């Protein structure tokens, strides 16, 4: 990655009731119909935070098992139209997510949290709306009016304690989640592996 800022990955977020209000499809359509260009950049087609990223409506505040799917198959329609700014893959050593973050800017507005070692949360507030939401935690109400989120389930062999996240100067996020090699070895031998 070219010149970039290393983001701190938080593991101690005890905020109660965050993401407790789901974004419904009709509410999302209403949000987009307001015509705010920043909202269209952040939640637009092909964005990591778009509820329509995976081909049908899926609330980004619900945890999604991203690494259970190949990015080529899940994003084929967006890639064919040149609208995808997201990619993920896995190597023998790590799971990797790369995403352009339009509308987020070059500031350290993006936050990365790991919830209970099971879910990685990527979120932040929309700069224009930060003043309005300071009265209460914006993640506990209609969060889409104040910011954005994408929650992803971590694979079983993810070493969540060693996650690294970087934001480049051109607003490309890269998250590297090392694989726990001890867990991978036992899974490869069939121990603890679910049959399909």
Image: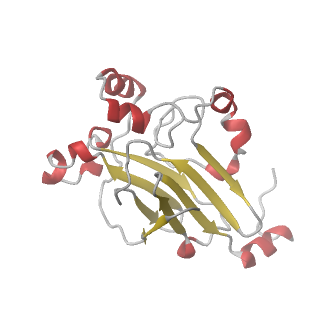
Picture quadrant of residue 143: top left
Q: Position of residue 115 (x, y in %)?
A: 45, 64
State the image quarter where residue 93 is shown.
bottom right
Side of 51 where 31 appears, left or right: left
Question: Could you tell whether 133 is left or right of 115 in the image?
Answer: left
> Residue 159 location in percent, x, y?
61, 72
Residue found at x 59% / y 62%: 1
Who's the residue at 15% across and 45% down the image? 132
Residue 183, image quadrant: bottom right
Q: Nearer the viewer, residue 137 or 170?
A: 170
As drawn, 47 above or below 30: below
Pick out the residue farthest to the right: 189
Q: Which residue, as the protein is rendered here, is positioned at the far top?
A: 33
Residue 122's spot in the image, x, y percent?
44, 55
**Residue drawn 30% across and 54% down?**
17
| Residue closest to the far bottom | 182
Name the foreground residue: 177 vs 26.
177
Colour pattern of the rendering: secondary structure
Where in the figure is residue 139, as x and y percent of width and height? Answer: 29, 50
Q: Is residue 31 above or below residue 128?
A: above
Q: Is residue 180 left or right of residue 49?
A: right
Q: How many marks?
A: 0
């Amino acid at each position: 990655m070219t010149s970039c800022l290393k983001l701190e990955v938080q593991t101690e977020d005890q905020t109660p009731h965050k993401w407790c209000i789901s974004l419904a499809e009709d509410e999302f359509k209403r949000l987009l119909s307001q015509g705010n260009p920043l909202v269209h950049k952040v939640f637009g087609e092909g964005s990591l935070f778009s509820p329509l990223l995976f081909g049908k409506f899926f609330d980004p505040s619900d945890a999604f098992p991203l690494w259970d799917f190949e990015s080529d198959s899940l994003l084929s329609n967006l890639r064919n139209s040149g609208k995808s700014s997201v990619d993920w893959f896995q190597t023998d050593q790590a799971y990797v997510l790369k995403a352009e973050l339009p509308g987020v800017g070059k500031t350290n507005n993006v936050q990365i949290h790991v919830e209970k070692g099971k879910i990685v949360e990527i979120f932040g507030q929309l700069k224009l709306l930060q003043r309005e939401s300071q009265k209460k935690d914006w993640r506990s109400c209609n969060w889409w009016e104040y910011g954005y989120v994408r929650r992803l389930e971590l694979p079983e062999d993810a070493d969540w304690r060693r996650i690294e996240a970087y934001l480049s100067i051109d607003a490309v996020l890269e998250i590297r989640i090392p694989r726990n090699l001890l867990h991978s070895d036992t899974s490869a031998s069939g121990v603890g592996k679910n049959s399909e």
